Amino acid sequence: MDMLDFFPSSILQAADTSWQTVTIAQRASSAFRDHDLSGTIGYLLLGLLFTAGLLTVLGLVLIYAERKLAGHFQCRLGPMRVGWHGILQSAADGLKLLLKEDIVPENADKLLHLGAPVLSLMATVLTLAILPLSPTLQVVDLNIGVIYVTAVTSLGVLAILIAGWSSNNKWSLLGAMRAGAQIISYELSATLSLLVMVLLSGSLQLSEIIQSQSDGWWIWKSHLVGVIAFVTFLISTTAELNRTPFDLPEGESELTGGFHTEYSGLRFAFFFLAEFVNMFVASALIVTLFFGGWMPFYIGGWDGFNSIMGLIPPGIWFAGKSAFFIFLLMWFRWTFPRLRIDQLMSLEWKILLPVGFINIFLAALIVLFEWHF
Amino acid sequence: MLLTFYILGTVSVLSALGVLVCRSPVYSAMSLVCSFFCLGGIYILMNVEFVAVIQILVYAGAILVLFLFVIMLLNIVPTGESVRFNLPVLIAFGIAVGLFAQISGLFLGDIQFGPKDVYTAEAISEEGSIGLIGRLLYGEFVLPFEAISILLLVAVIGAVIIGKRRLN
Amino acid sequence: MIPTTHVLILSAALFSIGVLGVMLRRNVIVIFMSIELMLNAVNLSFVGFAREMDSMTGVIFIFFIIVVAAAEAVVGLSIILSIYRNRQTLNVDEYNLLKW
């Protein structure tokens, strides 16, 4: 245990552990136990409204942020016309998509063409319910949280494949096949990084993973293992989101838009929204697993600093941290050029996956000998 | 809870029938996804959440995607495969119905269960079902576990070799 | 509490539907899907029995069955792909040669 002496343990300050996770589902069931029918229904409705509201807010904010950031990265101003500095731009975008003609290609498979965007949005909305935005802002706290997120997001592949196939268009089909191959490949290394964090924190439950970071975030506490897992997860999650530099599935210059070539109007909006919400889910997962979730940033010994940090409510911490990672993902888009398909595949199968396997082995060693702080 | 079980069970049987009825293999695959989802819901009702999530992750997220990939790679148009009620088809129906009657008659009759094990619902929730599965998988069942991993490896290598157009 | 017999009857129904699919359909991919359906029916009965007998063995066996199902799907679909390259058909009745 000499390694522990190497890092002075005083840099890790125990956070305030008085935060108890009380989910909306728990409130509903305790109200049900007290035979408080209106309370039960009220909390259930609150859960629904919270998820729906989160979806709407994320859609509005992230689309505006993407357009504004893209503008500033290219030394433009971005949207400026609708409202103050274009703040109502995403509402206007949504309205436009609502009013647009809904075109279905003549030889498309009508039912599946209709169903694919719904399935895509469903796969993302199902994950919103379990994200721990703050100790009290979580709809359900499943004991299988981490696997649940992977399982539900893997349904997105199904939606993309169906969308590409039912459009009856060769670009759509090619884009869908590329997206499917890419997402399935990168899901492997993403899951391996998730498993590293599950090993370290010893739980699959998202609230418990956060509680295990009360004496320091896993990215500091786990030596290099957490950092490697974080970098692999960031890369593979960018690939799973089909964002640049891994946006081959839609690659405008070669596939005219990929699997959603033939989509317009509201159905396209569904895919668009699902993509942005997925981005938030990925950032929220990164924050939860590596950066302490809603835990504030504490530095050991700096009591004044810590007490100021402790004043900021946990929900703000979570929002701020995930906003940073969303910004990072948007930044990637204007920094890295698109990969070729063979480069993409060799990055996953020849680099990320072996690194992931070695990393999980190291994590097992660290947990076994209790080398982490 | 019982009502939920009946609804899920009915939907899963109907969508399983949909697999047989649909002309297009893509529709069959989607129908199968629906059936798997209902089974996942039933697993959650029976307090085996981990199995439910693995069911969705592996079947809907991996195996069905594989099926869809093959269907799309081969670009299958629905063939004019029509079911006429001739003798072989009637025999097939007879066999299936007979099988169902046989098995369910067996279950409805007097089943003798063996001695009960120690993992009651309370014992499982005390240790946590996931932890328990992990402990058993790496303790009591470690040999089958290793064997199954070799099987998976063999399957992967076999698939690559068969799928390759020509071996040098 | 769901009665175990009802779970088992549901699993019997799904298994019979899978058997019917294998016998009725001629499209080899749909036949494969029916086999997956049968494996799932077996999984369901495993869970039912495991809960009735307070045992975890059934739940553990589900993981083995899922792995077998995945392996079977992978190998089977690659065989289908290589047959399709030679015969351009998915109808099992036309797969009447053992060697190509």
Image (spheres, coloured by chain):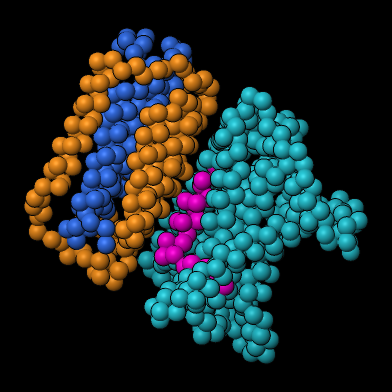
Chain colours: A cyan, B orange, C blue
Q: Is residue A133 above or below residue A14?
A: above
Front residue of A5 and A350: A350
Say if the magenta span includes residue A148.
Answer: yes
Residue A111 can be seen, yes or no: yes
For the point 53% across and 56% down, the residue is A126
For the point 48% across and 67% down, the residue is A140
Q: Position of residue B106 (x, y in %)?
A: 13, 43
Q: Position of residue A317 (x, y in %)?
A: 65, 74
Residue A21 can be seen, yes or no: no
Give the magenta part as a residue range: A137-157
Say if the magenta span includes residue B116.
Answer: no
Q: Quadrant of residue C72?
A: top left
Q: Position of residue B128 (x, y in %)?
A: 32, 67
For the point 46% across and 13% down, the residue is C88
Q: Quadrant of residue B115?
A: bottom left
Q: Quadrant of the N terminus of chain C?
A: bottom left
Q: Is residue B122 above or below residue A66?
A: below
Front residue of A317 and A371: A317
Q: Position of residue C59 (x, y in %)?
A: 27, 53
Q: Is residue A371 above or below residue B115?
A: below
Front residue of A9 and B24: B24
